Amino acid sequence: MPMKSIKPTRRRSGAGYSIPAAADQLDVSYKTLRTAIALKQAKTIQFGGQERMTQRELDRLREMFAGEDAAAQGA
């Protein structure tokens, strides 16, 4: 029986998402998300000395990126 490779999760319970994990959840590149953070289009929090992103912010960004995709397809 072949072994399945399981992708390790970057999610920590209750601490929000790391930036790489948030990029995975949003299906955008790490660089795209970092750019959005630098342009203050995305908000992060500090948790235990690490920069994290809340579920609420992920939901907001998912809607924002979905809107950009729809606009690009309609053009």
Image: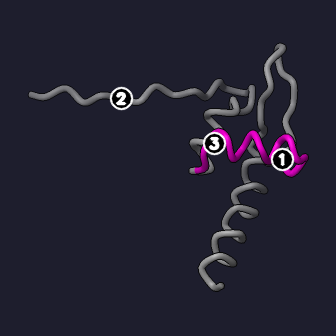
Report the residue at 80% width, 48% height from top: 36
Real-space Cα distance between discs 1 and 2? Answer: 29 Å
Magenta region, main secondary structure: helix
**Residue 8 coordinates in the image, percent (x, y):** 46, 25
Residue in the foreground of this view, choosing between 73 and 16: 73
Residue furthest to the bottom: 74
* Marks 1, 2: nearer the viewer: 1
Report the disc number at residue 42. Answer: 1
**Residue 74 coordinates in the image, percent (x, y):** 63, 85
Query: Image quadrant for the N terminus?
Result: top left
Determine which residue is flagged by label 3.
23
Query: Image quadrant for the C terminus?
Result: bottom right
Report the residue at 51% width, 28% height from top: 9
**Nearest to N terminus: mark 2 or mark 3:** 2
Q: Look at the picture and state if 62 lies above or below 39.
A: below
Q: Which residues are magenta?
A: 28-41
Q: To which quarter of the image does residue 55 belong?
A: top right
